[in-house]
Image (cartoon, rainbow, N blue to C red):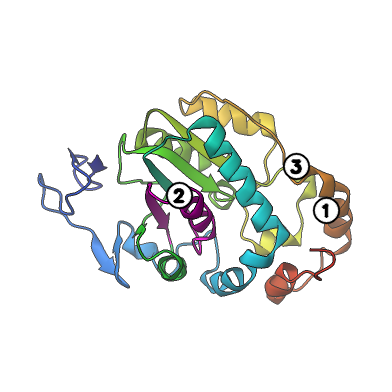
Amino acid sequence: MKRCLACNAHYPSSIVDCPTCGVEPTLVDGFYAYAPEFAHGGGGFKSDHFSALYCSEEANFWFRSRNQVILWAIKKYYPDFHSLLEIGCGTGYVLSGVAKEFPYKNLHGSEIFTEGLRFSSTRLPSVNFVQMDARCIPYVNEFDIIGAFDVLEHIEEDEQVLAQIYSAVKPRGVVLLTVPQHPWLWSETDKRACHVRRYIATDLIVKIEAAGFQVLRSTSFVTVLLPAMIVSRFFKRKMAAEEVKSELEISPWLN
């Protein structure tokens, strides 16, 4: 079901306009926008980073590895799902992996920036993409799986986002989250990425359970690289902000 952000009425997701109050989403850059005021400058990220991500994700070990973890989790916890929404889908790299592994599922992507959606729709022209603010999700009991991969750390109101996700996922649905861990690893890299926090696992679990969820599994990944991350973070804190692209470009042997 959709939820009207103006009058809170619920109605079938196939309908665009709210049948109760008549409000319809704005069309911005070809996408239905539920938070059009943020479409070109939503905060929490820099829209000019999407181009660098789009060019680098496919070859970068970290993005490939994260996709493998996400696909493993889907197969383990809800392999026969029908519908999936990715919140903060960026350039569509995660959804492209899901679409390849599950070619006949009903996939949806959302992003606060239409610039990200432009790249996503290029990768996946058959997927339904909308512009929205994760703090105010226009769906209720709609999706079997909702994913938010390295999204929560960009948003001050992470507990509000979790509550919205709880409303949007179907009863007994599955939510998949990834976030950066260990506040003591905080560095310029986090600032450049527009993070507002890094998480302690126990703190995140408390927030997740407060939203109404039951935690099925909480684990770390890319753990083998933790010593290298410590060295990198403590000795490269002065890296210039414009070096975002260079961070994504890793020498082939190291990659």
> Where residue 169 sits: x, y (%)?
38, 35
> Where residue 50 sits: x, y (%)?
54, 70
Q: CA distance from mark 1 to mark 2?
A: 27 Å
Q: Could you tell which of marks 2 and 3 lies nearer the N-terminus?
A: 2
> Where residue 236 sits: x, y (%)?
84, 64
Q: Residues within 10 Å of mark 2 (few under 14, many from 20)?
A: many
Q: Residue at x 37, y 66 (%)?
A: 125
Task: Please check the rendered image and state whether residue 195 is part of the magenta-colored stretch, yes or no.
Answer: no
Task: Please check the rendered image and state whether residue 89 is part of the magenta-colored stretch, yes or no.
Answer: yes
Q: Do residues under tags 1 and 2 come within 8 Å of each other at their CB atoms?
A: no
In the image, the segment drawn in magenta is: 87-112
Is 135 located above or below residue 244 in the figure? above
Q: Which residue is mark 3?
A: 182
Q: Could you tell which of marks 1 and 2 lies nearer the N-terminus?
A: 2
Q: Secondary structure at mark 2?
A: strand
> Which mark, by number, is residue 201?
none
Q: Could you tell which of marks 3 and 1 lies nearer the N-terminus?
A: 3
Q: Residue at x 89, y 55 (%)?
A: 231
Q: Which residue is mark 1?
A: 229
| Residue 242 seen in the current view | yes
> Where residue 53 sits: x, y (%)?
60, 68
Using the image as rendered, state which of residue 105 and residue 188 is in the foreground: 105
Is 97 located above or below residue 174 in the figure? below
* The C terminus sits in image quarter: bottom right
Q: Amino acid at mark 2?
A: Glu
Q: CA distance from mark 3 to mark 1?
A: 11 Å
Q: Secondary structure at mark 1?
A: helix
In this rendering, which labeled residue sits more in front, label 1 or label 2?
2
Using the image as rendered, state which of residue 47 and residue 125 is in the foreground: 125
Q: Which residue is mark 2?
A: 86
